[in-house]
Image: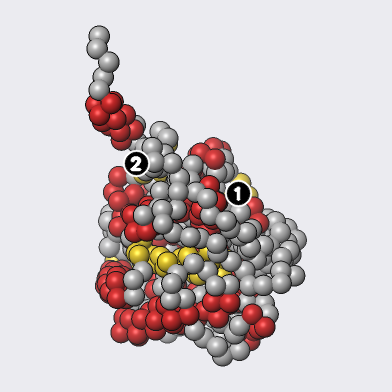
């Protein structure tokens, strides 16, 4: 038989890779390289997604796989003369919660599964003595406004933000009094910038309760433009890569409980829930047969009370008295006088508010980036594609399912280590296309996966203690 021509061989190989599920094969044929770019310093600006936050905590064994740290590794492989990519490490098991114990979620029991903190002593910061700003300036809980905020950032550990992670990352005012100034002090020639998620996520994760609205799109547009203007003015020659905002209906925090509750409801019974702003008698009726009404993961501990006369949610929240119209002798979640609370639900109007807000945010991001010569990573489009058909790498399929999908960590919002690798590869794909680089993709199989027993257990109805959400509420609380 005659030898195949080189062109045909290439076509066959590429086709085989595609049908095997290798969606993103790195540009190995060209060899990793920087093109005409010079990268001697890379800085990442963002929030918890940038910081390497996983499973409700910040801890070194997850921070090692933050998407910026993974990108830094691929830049070195391509010839970048980068020093150590410095991050504000917290030793395992990580950051403390409100009770002083490590807030990190773990599997408590495979029966359920029961998920939450294990009551361990927290870790400690291990890189505070670094004599310069961190390269990873991802601050969990930060919003677009925070890039330029100069109003005593150390005081952000107090009300109303109550977020000590600001003073962990921006630990020394000698390096500058906000995120921008600390980034500019490092004089990077490459910057990734991913802020804006929390401008809508706080509204969404609180069921539209706190804050009661997302950042208004007009305000976001102005703030985002100011942020990129300031970044470009401070670093006129830097290559800047921004990312847009995912659809909340992709995130398992919102999509896990509803489909699991539906089969457990008695025949003919539908969930009675409070619509946006309702505090007493509820008018909402949710068949839970589609995603028009989303049940937040914060409601997981209360699913066991469905159909029972119970006022546990009000007791847990410290209500001094029941709201007018509420009667906890009625079956919880099945009666309009003892309904599923508004704070645990995104109703159809709230889902629409999130959708229209995110669409407006992403239009503003695209326009601002185009006007300031910044590349855009379409995380929104990518994750919608994963939701529709999954994502394959080296024969393994990743989905947006809670835990078992492999992409998200135990809190249902932040990526797993391999999820962070997938995000890093989307940034790398954009950098290659926009800057003439040929960076290799991160090999997902080299990153820690979710242990098989844990992934298998996720098929049940998860139960997370209500108090375990205090850390996430601190990140996304009212501003």
Residue placed most toward the observer, 52 or 271: 52
The nearer-to-camera label among 1 and 2 is 2
* Residue 253, image x, y percentages: 44, 59
Residue 220, quarter of picture: bottom left
Crowd band around label 2 with a 10 angstrom C-alpha radius: few (<14), some (14–19), many (20+): some
Q: Secondary structure at mark 1?
A: strand
Residue placed most toward the observer, 147 or 190: 190
- 200 left or right of 367? right
Q: Identify which residue is drawn at 58% across, 58% down.
A: 82
Q: Secondary structure at mark 2?
A: loop
Give the residue furthest to the top.
1
Residue 295, quarter of picture: bottom left
Residue 103 visible, this angle: no
The disc label shown at residue 15, or none: none
Q: Tell which circle, 1 or 2, labels the residue nearer the N-terminal end.
A: 2
- 184 left or right of 228? right
Q: Residue at label 2? A: 23
Task: State the quadrant of the N terminus.
Answer: top left
- Badge 1 vs badge 2, beta-carbon distance below 8 Å: no
State whether residue 134 is above or below residue 36.
below
State whether residue 444 is above or below residue 273.
above
Q: Identify which residue is drawn at 62% across, 69% down.
A: 134
- 195 left or right of 77? left
Residue 37 visible, this angle: yes
Q: How many angstroms separate mark 1 from mark 2 (CA)?
A: 31 Å
Give the residue furthest to the front.
36
The disc label shown at residue 107, or none: 1
Residue placed most toward the observer, 438 or 283: 438
* Residue 457, image x, y percentages: 52, 42
Q: Identify which residue is drawn at 64% across, 80% down.
A: 175
* Residue 236, image x, y percentages: 43, 76
């Amino acid at each position: 038989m005659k030898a195949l021509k080189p062109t045909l061989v290439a076509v066959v190989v590429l086709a085989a890779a595609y049908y095997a599920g290798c969606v993103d094969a790195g540009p190995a044929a060209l060899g990793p390289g920087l093109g005409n770019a010079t990268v001697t310093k890379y800085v990442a600006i963002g929030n918890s997604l940038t910081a390497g936050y996983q499973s409700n905590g910040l801890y070194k064994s997850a921070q090692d796989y933050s998407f910026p740290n993974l990108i830094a590794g691929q830049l070195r492989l391509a010839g970048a003369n980068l020093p150590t990519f410095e991050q504000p490490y917290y030793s395992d098991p990580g950051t403390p919660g409100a009770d002083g114990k490590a807030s990190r979620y773990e599997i408590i029991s495979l029966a359920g599964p029961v998920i939450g903190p294990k009551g361990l002593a927290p870790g400690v910061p291990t890189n505070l003595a670094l004599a310069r700003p961190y390269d990873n300036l991802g601050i969990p809980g930060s919003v677009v406004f925070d890039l330029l905020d100069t109003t005593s950032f150390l005081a952000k550990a107090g009300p109303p933000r109550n977020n000590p992670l600001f003073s962990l990352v921006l630990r020394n005012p000698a390096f500058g009094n906000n995120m921008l100034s600390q980034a500019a002090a490092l004089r990077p020639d490459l910057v990734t910038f991913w802020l804006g998620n929390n401008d809508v996520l706080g509204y969404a994760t609180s069921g539209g309760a706190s804050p009661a609205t997302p950042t208004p799109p007009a305000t976001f547009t102005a703030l985002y433009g100011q942020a990129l203007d300031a970044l470009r003015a401070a670093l006129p020659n830097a290559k800047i890569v921004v990312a847009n905002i995912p659809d909340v209906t992709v995130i398992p925090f919102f999509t896990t409980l509803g489909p699991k509750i539906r089969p457990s409801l008695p025949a003919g019974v539908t969930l009675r829930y409070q619509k946006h702003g309702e505090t007493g008698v509820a008018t909402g009726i949710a068949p839970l047969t589609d995603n028009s009404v989303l049940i937040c993961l914060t409601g997981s501990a209360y699913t066991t009370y469905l159909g029972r006369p119970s006022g546990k949610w009000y007791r847990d929240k410290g209500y001094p008295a029941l709201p007018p119209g509420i009667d906890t002798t009625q079956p919880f979640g099945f009666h309009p006088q003892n309904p599923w609370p508004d704070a645990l639900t995104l109703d159809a109007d709230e889902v629409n508010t999130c959708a229209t807000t995110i669409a407006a945010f992403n239009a503003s991001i695209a326009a601002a980036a185009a006007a300031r010569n910044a590349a855009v990573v379409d995380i929104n489009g990518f994750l919608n594609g994963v939701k529709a058909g999954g994502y394959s790498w080296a024969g393994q399929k990743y989905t947006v399912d809670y835990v078992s999908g492999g992409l998200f960590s135990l809190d249902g919002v932040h990526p797993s280590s391999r999820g962070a690798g997938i995000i890093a590869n989307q940034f790398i794909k954009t950098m290659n296309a926009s800057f003439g680089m040929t960076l290799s993709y991160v090999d997902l199989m080299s990153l820690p996966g979710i242990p098989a027993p844990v992934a298998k257990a996720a098929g049940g109805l998860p139960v997370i203690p209500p108090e375990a959400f205090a850390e996430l509420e601190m990140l996304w609380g009212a501003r």
